[in-house]
Amino acid sequence: MATAIVTGTSSGIGEAIAQILLQNGYNVIGLSRRRGDIHHPLFEHLPCDLSDLAVVDILQKKLTEIEDLEILVNAAGFGRFEPHEELSSKTITDMISLNLTTPILLANALMRPLKKTKGMIINITSIEATRHSKFSALYSATKAGLRAFGLTLFEETRNAGVKVVTINPDMTETPFFDGFRFGVGKEDDTKLLTSDIAQAVQYLLDTREGICVTEMTIRSQRFGITKK
């Protein structure tokens, strides 16, 4: 049975994608600090801190033992939206590690298994990867870097049959905004739901062999934001 590895499965977009993959019959290995609410016989949780590169190094060795790996989803991430000089050095290094370095390391370690199965890498970035917003310099840099990595990696691996997809979601109703001074809009057409991103993944699973959707930008119809 085919296996998918998904980071950030404890909540939000990572959890929603894991659930859609489980519905499609994949064995799903979830990488996150907490298990979350996924309870399914095909789900295995590996507790880990993906911002700790020493932990990621150990994980790489374990994950390369999977022979039927077909999908890698890099969904874990976090953000801080403050003046750059107010960010701590730990916040800077942790965000770069989790949002950018770890996805690159996982793709590096798992590329050979994915080439064998002609599999797929899905990188969840952000709308901030495509624009320049105030107080978002660090977060945007990590997400723009992941976007550039994915789009370029497709050019490198396309002849080997590996699909590399970048998804840039607009503001999505998830715990991502907990603790911020702002959040998603209240109306349905001013925000995305995690199910919207999961449906996009379902579309990718349903596309015929021989084509690859390399990038998807998903936005709410109207702009909405709430202040807390």
Image (cartoon, grey):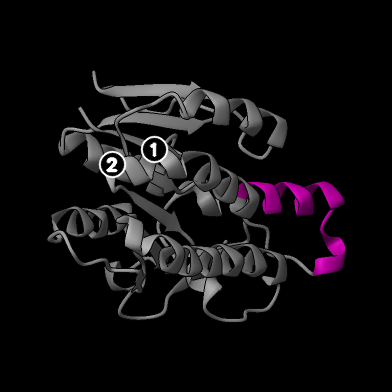
Dominant SS of magenta comes to helix
Name the secondary structure under disc 1: helix
Image coordinates for residue 6, horizontal then vertical, percent: 40, 39
The label shown at residue 104 is none
Q: Are marks 1 and 2 in contact (CB under 8 Å)?
A: yes
- Residue at 28%, 68% (x, y): give it: 213
Q: Which residue is mark 1?
A: 113
28 or 68: nearer the eye? 68
Res. 42 image quadrant: top left
Task: Tell me which amino acid carries mark 1.
Answer: Pro
State whether residue 85 appears in this view: yes
| Amino acid type, mark 2 | Thr
Give, as a single range, the part of the protein colored magenta: 84-98
Instruction: Indicate left or right for 97 with 123 as reference.
Output: right
The residue drawn where x is 82% and y is 58% is 87
Q: Does residue 83 sit above or below 204 in this rendering?
A: below
Q: In the structure shown, which secondary structural element does the residue marked by tag 2 occupy?
A: helix
Instruction: Kindly indicate the quadrant of the structure image that contains residue 102.
Output: top right
**Residue under label 2:** 117
Q: Quadrant of residue 193?
A: bottom left
